[in-house]
Image (tube, rainbow, N blue to C red):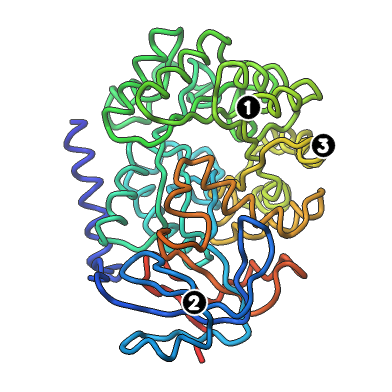
Amino acid sequence: MRRLLRLTSFFVIGTLSLFGQANPQPDTAKKIKIIKASRIFDSATGKYVSGQAIVIEGDRIKQLIPANEAAAMSGAEVIDLGSATLLPGLIDCHTHLGARADRYDEIYDFKDTPFQSAFAGVVNSRKTLEAGFTTVRDVGSLPFLAVDLRNSISEGFIIGPRIVASGPGISITGGHGDLNNFSPQTRVVMFPEERDFQIADGPDQVRHVIRAQVKYGVDVIKILATGGVLSKGDQPGAPQYTLEELKVAADTAHMAGRKSAAHAHWTQGIKDAISAGIDSIEHASLVDDEGIRMAKEHGTYFVMDIYNDDYILNEAPKFGLTKEKYDKEKALGQLQRDNFAKAFKAGVKMAFGTDAGVYPHGDNAKQFFYMVKYGMTPADAIQAATVNAATLIGRDKDVGSIAPGKFADIIAVSGDPLANVRELEHVAFVMKGGEVYKNTLAH
């Protein structure tokens, strides 16, 4: 049954691509393209470079040359974007591509099949790419939707960003990732083994579930160290895993060559995850001074989703958000933003992550404004979504900067995002792997 479901899910995604979403992988080998614009954002320095053009061969950047030499390269396709600003493709380290922001009512836990999530994943992948996010880390989806999306996009069946894929977030029984406060007879899984990929109690089960997820191709392990906000019957401040269990999770992931991410809102869960060797803390809403100090000492990344509070409090109630979840978000939202400012000022490594799927996909760049509002410069915020994010997800050799040898993942905006970071909310040009997916700027 499990094999049938995965094959069927893959068929659904493939079929969607054939009917209206098709984008067969182009043959980019040997093709030379040159992109020119007023300025290029150097994500290593956080400053602009002017008077340069980007030479692309196939799907990677070959070199940067003086812009006035571009016309001399015979046979090259020149893309002149005039006074625009070029930046590396943006990276969102916390997304849920299979999730919809109009699905807060718990009835959908019982009405929707996994195929609804697959349909959403196809649509949301394209929206995300067209918003300028050429790479994302999906940190929680049905087993193993993110893996199938990653593979389908890589093979050219559908349009979307590069995906670093996790399986479902690993939870204790009755925790943030479980189905709570319903009768024991209630089930919403299509096959009983689904829980084998998500629920783990004790070190041995944690180790087993991680190995099972690795078996099916995940890139990163997501473990739920504390309770959550958008779940029933648990509290964000409740620790879910012991230090021993979290250490087993980090060690097992690392032994398999995978990184690990911990959902953690409360102070003790954050500190235990850092001590255990988890690579990134997701949310970090109520981190205290000791947790900030520990994160800095260990080099642990914080991925803090400080935009979506606006959407949850103002829009989600229209789509069935319960009072329990609303109250939990209201209690945490502003504290998380204040702690973001404290952690950044203290020197904690920050990577851009939004929890896309909690709010509509494609609005990812709205978070830049809040990152600047709470202490970052525009350059800092863009670096969090480029070089910092690329390092966190282990893809810094391929993405995160405009440099020779990197993938030709390049975006452009018409204005100056260092003067007004909200320019990034209006990306007008998107290239991924040397292929243009959006362009309203070409001269």
Residue 436, position in %: x, y?
40, 75
Residue 254, position in %: x, y?
42, 24
Q: Is residue 18 above or below residue 72?
A: above
- Residue 337: image quadrant is top right
Kindly report which numbered mark, 3 or 2, lies closer to the viewer in this rendering. Answer: 2
* Label 2 crowd (10 A; few <14 / some 14-19 / many >=20): some
Which mark sits nearer the N-terminus, 1 or 3? 1
- Element type at mark 2: strand
* Label 3 crowd (10 A; few <14 / some 14-19 / many >=20): some
Residue 46, position in %: x, y?
68, 59
Query: Residue at 45% across / 76% down in the picture?
Result: 438
Whether residue 335 is visible? no
Amino acid at pointer 3: Lys
Residue 429, position in %: x, y?
51, 75
- Element type at mark 3: helix
Q: Nearer the viewer, residue 237 or 418?
A: 418
- Residue 226: image quadrant is top right
Amino acid at pointer 1: Ala
As measured in the structure, the alpha-carbon distance from the residue carrying label 2 to the one carrying label 1 is 45 Å
Query: Residue at 63% across / 30% down in the picture?
Result: 299
> Which residue position is annotated with label 3?
342
In-image side of 31 versus 423 (left or right): left
* Label 1 crowd (10 A; few <14 / some 14-19 / many >=20): many
> Which residue position is annotated with label 1?
264
Which mark sits nearer the N-terminus, 2 or 1? 2
> Which residue position is annotated with label 2?
65
